[in-house]
Image: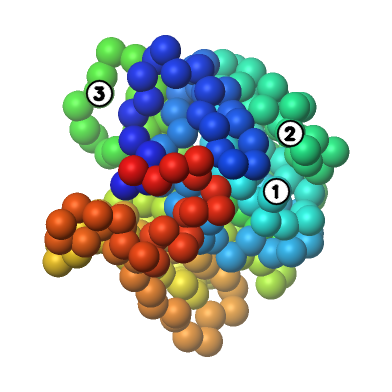
Amino acid sequence: MGVSDEVKPKDQYFHFKGFSVRHDRSSMKVGTDAVLLGLLASCPEHGKMLEVGSGCGVISLIMAERSQGEFIAIDPDEQSLLDTKENFTFSKWHDRLECKQETIQQLAQTSTQQYNFIFSNPPYFNKCLKGPNETRNRARHTDTLPFDQFASSTSKLLAPGGIVSVILPSDQKASFVCEMNKVGLGLSRSIDIIPVEGRTPIRVLMEFSYDTPQIEYQQLTLRNRNGEITEEYKSLGNNWYLRMR
């Protein structure tokens, strides 16, 4: 993959060509899933954008470079918000970036604002063995944000004509689609992420909307059978990564 899913604690910053992010305090470090969501999602050119579970804010920063929209990122974890706020403050797009310590459930109950685009790299572990880091557990396990609550909350916050974009393990696709369908949001785009040519997908990027006349299916293969980065992945990431490895 382009970046490791785990970054050593001593690596305080991750550097892209256009900006750097601090991520040592965040519950989730910069990882391939987040970057792929930032690069592949159908981010509108303008409008109100909401990131659910900001971590260090890297996805919003990537999208702020791609879009002229106004972004708000929410995360319940105080330490993650420290990274997000610092990264937003020192970015070139600071005037279009805002962050708040809040859950999507709380926002859906209190806010009258609707968003043209909602995106997330949400928790997906369900009834799995947890590690010793409670903050990381909250970010990765569905205890505090089950799929049904994500679906019901986004349905309240999504503007007419808006899009919800998420990235999840492929084996979670069916259950997530089911919950989104229950609130009237249909799958409009699905991108299978294949780690190595010939293998089964390990991640899927999905997009949902209220108006889904047909589903657009795509694939992205990250490496060929020799372990080399594919040309399609290079063309996607070369303008962002300092180096692809």
On the picture, is 47 further left or further right than 11? right
Q: Earlier in the sequence, mark 1 or mark 2?
A: 1
**Quarter occupied by the C terminus:** top left
Circle nearer the viewer, 1 or 3: 1
- Judging depth in this view, the residue of 51 and 153 nearest the camera is 51
Q: Is residue 20 visible?
A: yes
Identify which amino acid the numbered label 1 is placed on: Ala
The residue tagged 1 is 64
Secondary element at image label 2? loop
State the separation of the CA atoms marked 1 and 3: 33 Å
- Kindly identify the residue that appears in the image at 29 percent across and 38 percent down: 125
Secondary element at image label 1? helix
Q: Give how far across and how far down residue 219 sits, in percent.
A: 34, 70
Q: Earlier in the sequence, mark 1 or mark 3?
A: 1
For the residues labelled 1 and 3, say whether their Cβ atoms are less than 8 Å apart.
no
Classify 154 as above or below 220: above
- Kindly identify the residue that appears in the image at 32 percent across and 47 percent down: 1
Q: Give how far across and how far down residue 87 sits, in percent.
A: 67, 28
Identify which amino acid the numbered label 3 is placed on: Lys
The residue tagged 2 is 91
What crowding class fits label 1: few (fewer than 14 Cα within 10 Å), some (14-19), or many (20 or more)?
Answer: many
Classify 21 as above or below 38: above
For the residues labelled 1 and 2, say whether their Cβ atoms are less than 8 Å apart.
yes
State the separation of the CA atoms marked 2 and 3: 34 Å
The residue tagged 3 is 130
Circle nearer the viewer, 2 or 3: 2
Residue 54 occupies quadrant: top right
Q: Is residue 157 visible?
A: no
Q: Give how far across and how far down residue 9 sits, in percent.
A: 40, 15
What crowding class fits label 2: few (fewer than 14 Cα within 10 Å), some (14-19), or many (20 or more)?
Answer: some
For the residues labelled 2 and 3, say whether their Cβ atoms are less than 8 Å apart.
no
